[in-house]
Amino acid sequence: METFDLPHVILPTEFCSLLKLNLAVANSSALVLESINKNKALYLSLEKIFKEFDDGRGFEKTMAGLGWPNFRDRLASIYFYRWIHGRFPHKAQPELIEDVKVLENQFQHHSLNGYSRLFLLGFYLKMVNLKSQRHPPQSFNFKIPDEIVILLRLSQIKSEKIDWLILMLTHLIWGLGYDTLLNYLASGKKMDHLYELLDPDARRMMFQNLLAYGVSIGEEDFFLYQKI
């Protein structure tokens, strides 16, 4: 069985909150602005960084004009740049999120429109990777198995919390093996039953890693409710 400990990392609260919302709604710009406004230092920094897109009507109109997906991508790149260099960039660096976009595109057909849960998972994993690079003794080799796509195709229902589902399936593959898991899922076995089939070490690893992810993104629903 493969083993890996996902760490807790401190992520930007306002950004994680937005990535968990359904922003395919009419007032999405207002929701984004409300969240960013809670951090005045961030708001003032973003005004300067996004100046290149400002047509004279101010930051709010600039943000609305870019649209949530484009603004989200650029904002993520700003957080990555700040983590790497210790300061905000003069402008967004879209190349810093290419790997996050690859993950999002790989699984987007299994996620509900309007949510950025896949982007959230990619954002977390990228931050973990950057953290491990800053501390050389640590290594980060976590990889979402390619077989996850096949397993997701077994369900005709798109998942709102696709990030949690992917992490759970990854651990089930590690603990049970892909062929065994595929047969169980094809026969209609539920997630709680499959969890019980894991040996104690695999259960412990799964729980600890999911807990680390939940704490990092500021979400405890997984531990309070059964539905994902």
Image (spheres, rainbow, N blue to C red):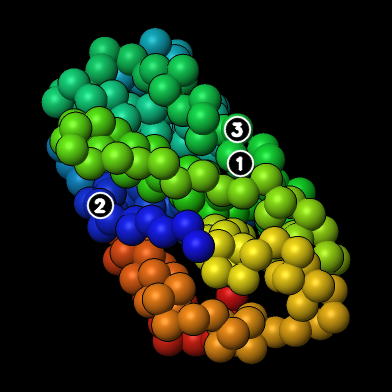
Q: Is residue 141 left or right of residue 183?
A: left
Q: Residue at the spot x=78%, y=54% of the render? A: 150
In the rendered image, the residue lying farthest to the front is 1
Q: Whole-percent x and y of residue 140?
A: 35, 41
Q: Whole-percent x and y of residue 157?
A: 79, 68
Image height of 70 relative to 161, above or below: above
Q: Residue at the spot x=22%, y=51% of the render? A: 10
Is residue 23 visible in this depiction of the protein?
A: no
Is residue 142 visible in this depiction of the protein?
A: yes
Work out whether residue 55 or residue 209 is closer to the camera in this orientation and state it: 209
Q: Quadrant of residue 67?
A: top right
Image height of 20 relative to 91, above or below: below
Quadrant for the C terminus, please. Answer: bottom right
Q: In this view, does 31 lie to the left or right of 208?
A: right
Of pointers 2 and 1, the one earlier in the residue sequence: 2
Instruction: Confirm or deny contact between disc 1 and disc 3 (CB under 8 A).
Output: yes
The amino acid sitting under disc 3 is Val
Does dot 2 land on a helix, a strand or a loop? Answer: loop
Label 1 sits on residue = 104
Does dot 3 land on a helix, a strand or a loop? Answer: helix
Label 2 sits on residue = 9
How far separated are the C-alphas under marks 3 and 2?
22 Å
Q: Residue at the spot x=67%, y=45% of the render? A: 146
Does dot 1 land on a helix, a strand or a loop? Answer: helix
Q: Residue 102 carries which label?
A: 3
Work out whether residue 91 or residue 154 is closer to the camera in this orientation and state it: 154
Image height of 220 relative to 66, above or below: below
Q: Residue 154 carries which label?
A: none
